[in-house]
Image (cartoon, helix red, strand yellow):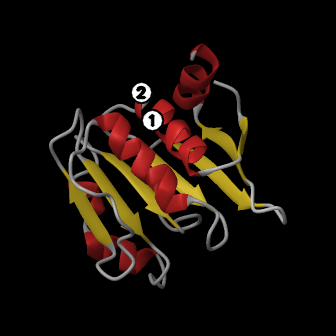
Amino acid sequence: MKREHVLPDLADTHALGEALAALVRPGDLVVLVGPLGAGKTALTQGIGAGLGVREPVTSPTFVIARVHRGGRLPLVHVDAYRLGGHADVDDLDLDASTDESVTVVEWGQGLVEQLADEHLEVRLDRRDDDVRTALLVPHGPGWTARLDAS
């Protein structure tokens, strides 16, 4: 899979999420980085659709974390925006569910990487023309190999 993506509309962001869903395995961590409105929740919705999650995937801003079951893998969707640090992440007890799930964390850079030996970082941005972009940054040989093979 190529590392850089231009996402002109919502359907393109969902499609990238669906493509990523085909690559994820139990225990995977995906960290979404980017400013407000860059497409983090939209990408997660695509991952959910690709996993076969039937319920709506919405931003967990106020509940901090949601678990979506019923797909190929459980999807743990976390919004770390309001978390103050590693202690707050530990309080969520996310590592209890990471082995059998795919965990997608919005705003998690610098807070959640310790949850897995390897992770995929997706750097999302919104250009001045409102087109979104995504850069896939693998952290670890497993993610590098998966992206290179797809």
User: Is any part of residue 29 visible from this angle?
Assistant: yes
The numbered mark at residue 128 is none
Task: Please state which of the two labelled residues, at mark 2 or mark 1, is closer to the viewer.
Answer: 1
Using the numbered discs, state the Cα–Cα distance from disc 2 to disc 1 in whole angstroms.
7 Å
Outermost residue toward the right?
A: 128
Q: Secondary structure at mark 1?
A: helix
Please name the residue shown 51% across and 68% down the image: 111
Residue type pointed to by label 1? Glu
Closer to us: 80 or 51: 51
User: Is any part of residue 118 visible from this angle?
Assistant: no
Query: Which residue, given by chain and number where applicable, does mark 2 sit on?
Result: 22
- Measured as percent of width and height from the top left, residue 73 is found at 24, 37
Q: Quadrant of residue 3?
A: top right
The numbered mark at residue 18 is 1
Please name the residue shown 72% across and 59% down the image: 125
Closer to us: 42 or 90: 42
Closer to us: 147 or 130: 130
Considering only vertical position in the picture, is 50 above or below 104?
above
Please name the residue shown 67% across and 56% down the image: 124
Residues at circles 2 and 1 in contact by the CB criterion of under 8 Å = yes
